[in-house]
Amino acid sequence: MINFKNEAPDFRYYAMRKGREFGIKGIIPLIANNSIVIHAERTETSLNAYCEILKTGTPFCTIGRFSTFNAQVLHYNTLEITNEHSLLTDTHTVRTKTRILRLGIFGL
């Protein structure tokens, strides 16, 4: 999960663009309450590099807190922004299987 210290305009688009550069697959749901959860699937090396990029934030937002967790791999084909916001809003609803970032990054 990524929590922002301030508003995070266009951070989902930034996360999608950077994720695609690393070959990340998954979804980036709606931002709510200055936070975002990204369900991302890829190798551990790619996920770690992706996380390091996202932890720095952008010139338009500052990261307050960044955390990861393990979750079920759902085998997405692409990394897309979605209007769904309930898929990963509760960490207890996701069964742990592989490494993931709550920001939601899921490793294969």
Image (cartoon, rainbow, N blue to C red):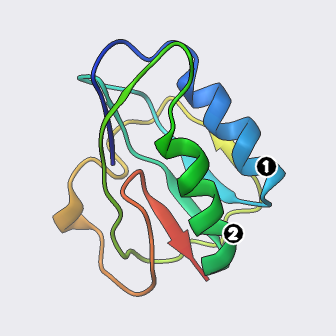
The answer to which image quadrant residue 16 occupies is top right
Q: Which residue is pictured at 79% across the width and 49% down the height?
A: 20
The answer to which image quadrant residue 62 occupies is top left
Relative image position of residue 88 (x, y in whole percent): 34, 52
The quadrant of the image that shows the C terminus is bottom right
Relative image position of residue 50 (x, y in whole percent): 63, 56
Direction left: furthest residue: 92
Residue density around tag 2, few if under 14, some if 14–19, many if 20 or more, within 10 Å? some
Three-letter amino acid code of the residue under disc 1: Arg
Residue density around tag 1, few if under 14, some if 14–19, many if 20 or more, within 10 Å? some
Q: Nearer the viewer, residue 3 or 63?
A: 63
The answer to which image quadrant residue 14 occupies is top right
Direction bottom: furthest residue: 97
What is the distance, in whole Å, between disc 1 and disc 2 at their CAs?
Answer: 11 Å
Q: Measured along the vertical axis of the image, is residue 74 above or below residue 16?
A: below
Q: Secondary structure at mark 1?
A: helix
Q: Earlier in the sequence, mark 1 or mark 2?
A: 1
Callout 1 touching callout 2 (CB < 8 Å): no
Three-letter amino acid code of the residue under disc 2: Ser
Q: Which residue is pictured at 55% across the width and 54% down the height?
A: 52
21 horizontally vs 75: left or right: right
Q: Which residue is pictured at 31% across the width and 14% down the height?
A: 6
76 horizontally vs 104: left or right: right
Which numbered mark, 1 or 2, is in the foreground of this view? 2
18 horizontally vs 104: left or right: right
Relative image position of residue 61 (x, y in whole percent): 45, 19
The numbered disc on residue 70 is none
Mark 1 = which residue? 20
Relative image position of residue 98 (x, y in whole percent): 45, 84
Mark 2 = which residue? 46
Q: Secondary structure at mark 2?
A: helix
Q: Which residue is pictured at 44% across the width and 70% down the height?
A: 100
